[in-house]
Amino acid sequence: MALCSVRWFRMAQGIPDEVMMNTTLIKDLADVGKDAALLQGVIMRIKDTPNSSELVTYAPFTLFPTPVPKAVFLQALAVQTHYNTLVDKISRDPDFLQDALASTIAVDDFTARLFRIHQQILREGRSQSIVLGLNRSDYMLDQREDGTSSLKQIEINTFAASFGGLSSRTPDVHRHILKVAGRLEESQRILDNNPAAGLAGAIAKAWELYGSERAVIMFLVEESQRNIFDQRYIEDELWKRNIPSIRKRFDDVCKTGSLDQDKRLFVDGLEVAVVYFRNGYMPQNYVSEQTWDARLLMERSLAVKCPDISTHLAGTKKVQQVLARPGVLEKFFPDQPQVVEQIRATFAGLYTLDMGPEGDRTVAMALAAPDRFVLKPQREGGGNNIYGSEICQVLEGMKESTERMAFILMDKIHPTPSQNYLLRRDAPLQIRNCLSELGVFGAYVRQGNDMVMNECVGHLLRTKSSEHSDGGVAAGVAVLDNPLLI
Ligand code: ADP
Ligand code: MG
Ligand code: MG
């Protein structure tokens, strides 16, 4: 059965076994592919010198695109504007956030700290009515018994969702490889994709509404900037519109950031219209109290924050679990049952670990069949989840304790594996059983009660070897890919 489905997928991919198994040809195609990636700018700095562009390499990617059923792909695109609306509504509902996160913040220091900033902003009153949301909703295609697959959301990232830049350039890489492999027809079926332009379009809109020609977009960037080119594509789109953008670290804001009497944010002497956070989603990003002060300063300012603190909290995994409870989506879309239906269709099973009988049932269920679930803390960036027998170890250790409330439990999704080669610097070229995750980029801008823009702006396919349970591209596990619709 497994063999049969692999063969079927290979055929669907249009890459016959004679090609997949011809090591000389694969090696040639890999070389062609790496050059194409460099030519197209699908690049990263190297690990040893992440803050210099003297040495760059290709960003890791698959040799071939991966088949994705068209209906499921279109379903993911179609639901995106509703997810944008949902995230926005949550961010405007302090009571919901308070209730949803109450148990989590009792035990998770990082979320609690973010929540305190959120409360302070609520007390002081939000100084800016323009909201800019750039998110990426991630899915896997769960294999059904009848051979079809269903779209299941893994998570939604409302903070620093990456690879919108590089994924704008990968289509031409796969087109080229397929042409050289003699697969012209498949090559022509690779979809265009340009999240960079769409994300930049929303940032530009927020900048325009802010209404100061002098003011800049500030990318708040990491200490280590290996993936800088992913962001440069967005910066480039802004510069094309003659919108100045700068890159600053938390430390720069600590040292030179200030608010004037109107709460306008100045960094290094420049007025900041939009803070686009590409750093600040992990506890370790906050190296000192001054870093937290800098975050608070930016949140309190008149600058448009992407995301603002409440939108950041709306992207937590605890909120995702609460949304899956009966009746919750209906509260956000009281007169739109079709929207509720469309969003809910993408939910996997999500279970609370709060104290009480419901949480106890979750614990018992997970201990009885750990392989059916993923245990997730409120963390981002890959590599934080717990799988398999480790779920038992961790849960046994905390099942009677409130510590368990820092986690949620989720059904494990089982996508159909496909075979591919993962091109990564210093890794052997081997055929692998792979699993893919589809991301869809959403962008919206609201001013007061007026949704000025709400769009789906592109997609991202990431593929990893099936031996890894967890981890994204930045975590060194997944690689960039393209869907080939079937
Ligand atoms: P993060 O915010 O760290 O990216 P995710 O929820 O996306 O957290 O989980 C990280 C990775 O773990 C995903 O990219 C995916 O490979 C895997 N994963 C997460 N949830 C599931 C799930 N329910 N079923 C199967 N794999 C999952
Ligand atoms: Mg995430
Ligand atoms: Mg993720």
Image (cartoon, rainbow, N blue to C red):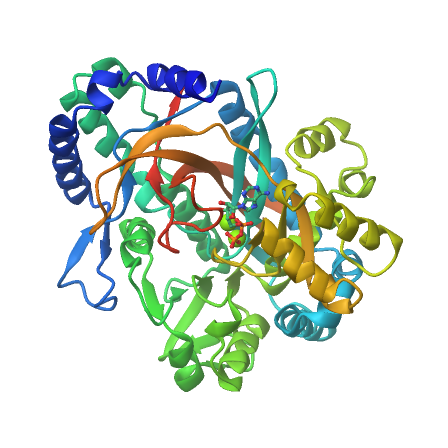
Q: In the visual, does 260 lie left or right of 67?
A: right
Camera sees residue 89: no
**The C terminus sits in image quarter:** top left
Q: Which residue, as the protein is rendered here, is positioned at the far right?
A: 357
Q: Is residue 253 visible?
A: yes
| Horizontal and vertical percent position of residue 96 | 78, 56
Is 106 drawn above or below residue 444 in the view shown? below
Depth order, front residue of 49/219:
49
Quarter occupied by residue 37 = top left
The image quadrant of residue 420 is: top left
Q: Residue at x 53, y 24 (%)?
A: 72
Image position of 259 with respect to 382: above or below: below
Residue 358 appears at what percent x and percent y? 85, 51
User: Observer-nearest residue: 34 or 275?
Assistant: 34
Q: Is residue 397 above or below residue 34?
A: below
Q: Nearer the viewer, residue 415 or 255?
A: 415
276 relative to 366 in the view: left or right: left
Residue 153 % position (x, y): 59, 39
> How many labels, in total?
0
* Picture residue at 69% right of the left edge, 63% below the top: 406
Q: Is residue 3 left or right of residue 298?
A: left
Residue 94 horizontal/vertical position (percent): 75, 60
Residue drawn at (51%, 37%) of the image: 455
